[in-house]
Image (cartoon, rainbow, N blue to C red):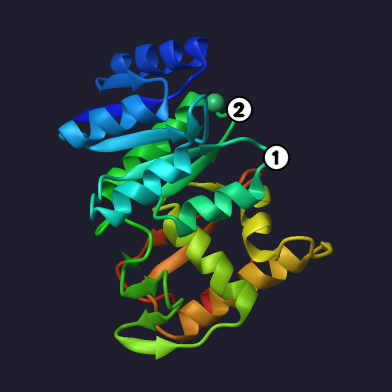
Amino acid sequence: MRLLVVEDEPELGRLLLANLARLGLSADLATDVATAADFVSAGGYDLVLLDQRLPDGNGLDLLRRLRAKRNETPVIVVSAADAVQDRVAGLHGGADDYIVKPFALDELVARIRAVLRRPGRALGVELALGNVRFNCVSCAVEIDARPVLLPRRELAALEALMRADGRVITRETLEDAIYAMNEERQSNVLESSVSRLRRRLAGEGATIEIRVVRGVGYRLVATTAAAAPDMAADP
Ligand code: CA
């Protein structure tokens, strides 16, 4: 397992390398787009952690160049907190995931593991858990190989939960996912969307279940059998 960290802030770069090494993940450091491009073309990386704002350009340009050359090395884009547009561009540009600065190391490691575990990996393919499949391009959902149409918010919540790949996702993250940008937020919309999604999944015989992690958020788990719809009420 070998990672490439592309980061121009020397302190953060060193910190990342040291901490990844501590976890048994060896990583190289590139501090600009040109060096990163050289390293990646030399090959052999299992994952690239890619900062966006680099001294000689934007990390996303490197990402686009890689994907154009059919290089499918998983990439996690590191976004500045104020750059929502960049984040969206990153995912459209072929990033497998993104993380927002400043981030906790635990969160980063969880993302790295999730990306490396993900079947097909790149966004633009199918996410699968239990008998539920989610196509990230078409937003088509299939449960037990049957197409299921979901309203926008439930669809967004399901995608966010499936992308988390079993990790807990915070209330705030899920809320970000179900609202369009600039949309006014209302209380209880998250709860009612999750509750409708949960009932729908149960009703369609899905072998996945949304669990509430008290005080934190939600996570998706695979169950051995479909939950009975009447067991699916909010806790
Ligand atoms: Ca930077």
Seen at 36% across and 26% down, the residue is: 5
- Is residue 152 in view? yes
* Residue 83, above or below 51: below
Q: Quadrant of the C terminus?
A: bottom right
- Is residue 218 in view? no
In front of the other: 24 or 124 = 124
| Three-letter amino acid code at the position of disc 1 | Asp
Labels 2 and 1: the sequence-earlier one: 1
How dense is the environment of label 1, judged by Cα within 10 Å: few (below 14), some, or many (20 and up)?
A: few
Please state the horizontal and vertical placement of residue 170, each as a whole percent of the image: 61, 47
Q: Secondary structure at mark 1?
A: loop
The quadrant where ligand 1 appears is: top right
Lateral position of residue 192 relative to residue 109, left or right: right
- The answer for how far apart the CA atoms under marks 2 and 1 are is 11 Å
| Three-letter amino acid code at the position of disc 2 | Pro
Lateral position of residue 88 relative to residue 109, left or right: right
Seen at 62% across and 68% down, the residue is: 194
In this rendering, the label closer to the viewer, 2 or 1 = 1
* Residue 130, above or below 62: below
Q: Quadrant of the N terminus?
A: top left
Please state the horizontal and vertical placement of residue 74, each as a whole percent of the image: 30, 45
Residue labelled with disc 2 = 102
Please state the horizontal and vertical placement of residue 141, each as a whole percent of the image: 42, 79
Residue 82 is marked as 1
Seen at 42% across and 11% down, the residue is: 14
Q: Quadrant of residue 154?
A: bottom right
